[in-house]
Every structure is written in structure tokens, then in C-alpha cells.
Image (spheres, helix red, strand yellow):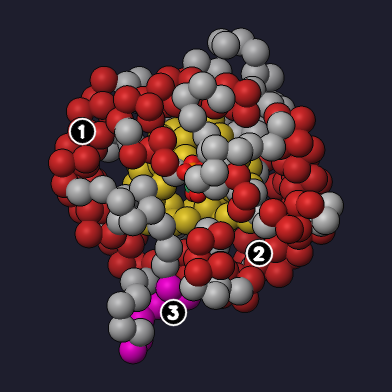
Amino acid sequence: MSGQKQWPTQYPARRAMVVGNWKMHGDVALTRAFAAEAARQPNTRDSAEVILAPPVPFLDITRNMLSGMWSLAAQDCHWAQSGAYTGEISAEMLAEFGCGYVIVGHSERRILMGETDEYVQGKIEAALAAGLTPIMCIGETLAQHQAQETFITLASQLYHGLPSSAVQREVVIAYEPVWAIGSGLTPTPEEVQDCHDHIRTFLCTHWNAQKGESARVLYGGSVKPDNVADFLTLADVDGVLVGGASLDPTAFADIVRSAFAL
Ligand code: 13P
């Protein structure tokens, strides 16, 4: 696969990114298994960046075990800096724990927890204020997909969810079709490229060409070792956001190797 990817060299920020979202899974033993795997993998961050997003109780132990080999993300944050929000965690707290990234607006939170674009916007603002890089998830439901409303849904989520402050900072966008998450179904590579092209065109218009072209746009939804290259080699796909396969150290290592081989 090496050599197939044509990276836009004028935008050096666009290098491969692999994010493992453990969701509400995992334990200390799994963290140890990942630390052992990370030690066996290439870790020159110039060519690819690997990020783990374990549940909050495992952030500290994951950071210590990874000892800088891979980066750390949280799966969510609150929009306020602090306050009477029982059970919530602020972006500043995550930054203090060593997180460099935070996933925001995952469809499971939008659908199951009723998160609106307005919440997502507040969380991105909070993340940026705390020095974290938000990974903003967007994606259409099956009904929207079948009604051919994918592009309008993506544009609406970006328009209403991106704060104006984002133009000066890095926000990673993750396109995750809701119907592809955990289903074993994926869009075709052509469909993924079309959606990523649409997202990048939106960003170039909404921000400016330089900013839009240098933004990293990830694909997520049933990414596995045997299909990851189909997505990573697409012109406007800069990495992958992996759910189920990120819970298997061997499968995740295969995906990481594909990213470093680009
Ligand atoms: P799966 O890889 O299990 O489909 O999950 C994708 C996802 O939701 C990552 O955030």
C-alpha cells in the first residue's frame, strides 16, 4: 500500500491519524495490552499520529503506560469551565490529565443523550479554550441517507456546530455515518470520498481555502484491518476513528501499521 496515497505536501498538518474510541468498554488489563502493543509499533509522529480514547477512569493509567508513545483523547467534555454539573467533566480537567484531544458530538451522544448542535458548539469552544484539539463527529442517520439528505445533514451539523473561534485553531472533523457504526456496513470508498470532499469544500467556504485544505477529516464506521486501506488511501481522508476494532490490540495494531505505511 505504501506510496499509493498522494498527501497534499503544501498542507503538512494533514498526516495520517488513527483514533481508537473505546466507548464504555475496557479495563486496566486492556490498557496494559495496548501499552505493550504501542511499544512494538512505529511511533514517529511525523508520519502518523495514534490516539487512544479510553473511558475517563482509565485516562491516567493509559497516559502513564503509553509514556508518550501514543496520544490521549477523552470521549466527551462539558461546555462549562466548572460549576454545579454533577457527573460532568470539564475540558480543563481533561487537559490536566494529559489529554491532547477530545471527541465531541459523537452520534451516540447526539442520539442517546439528546446533544444538540448548540451543545456541540459549546463543547468545542470549551475544548479550544482549554488547549485541547476537538474531534468533531458528524454524520447522517440511515433515514437521512435513504432520503439522500447526507450532504445537507453534514453541512447543517458543521454550520451550527462549529464556533467562530474555530477558524484560528485546529478542529479535526470525523465523518461517521450513523448507520455504519457497529453495523459492519460501510459506504463505498467513492461515497466516503464524495462526503469528505463535500466537508472540505464546506470548510474552505466557511473558513478559507488554506484552513479548509489543511483540516484533518477522518472517516469512522465499521473500520477494520481488512478495509482500512480502502479509506486511508482516499484523497480527502486523513485518518480513521475506530470503535469496535480499537478494543482488540492486534486488530488496532494492524490498522496503525496501515496508517504508517501510507
Ligand atoms: P465502530 O468502528 O464500532 O463501527 O464504531 C465507530 C465509532 O463510533 C467510533 O467513534
Mark 3 to mark 2: distance in Å?
A: 17 Å
Secondary structure found at label 2: loop
Q: Quadrant of the C terminus?
A: top right
Q: Is residue 89 visible?
A: yes
Of callouts 3 and 2, the N-terminal one? 3
- Does ligand 1 reach within 8 Å of label 3's beta carbon? no
The residue positioned 42% from the left and 26% from the top of the image is: 256
Q: Nearer the viewer, residue 240 or 48?
A: 240
Residue placed under numbered mark 2 in the picture:
162
Residue 136, image quadrant: bottom right
From the top left corner, tell me how far across and down residue 30 is, in percent.
21, 40
Residue placed under numbered mark 3 in the picture:
80
The residue positioned 35% from the left and 20% from the top of the image is: 42
Q: Amino acid at mark 3?
A: Ala
Residue placed under numbered mark 1 in the picture:
33
Which stretch is magenta? 78-84
Q: Amino acid at mark 2?
A: Leu
Of callouts 3 and 1, the N-terminal one? 1
| Magenta span main SS | loop
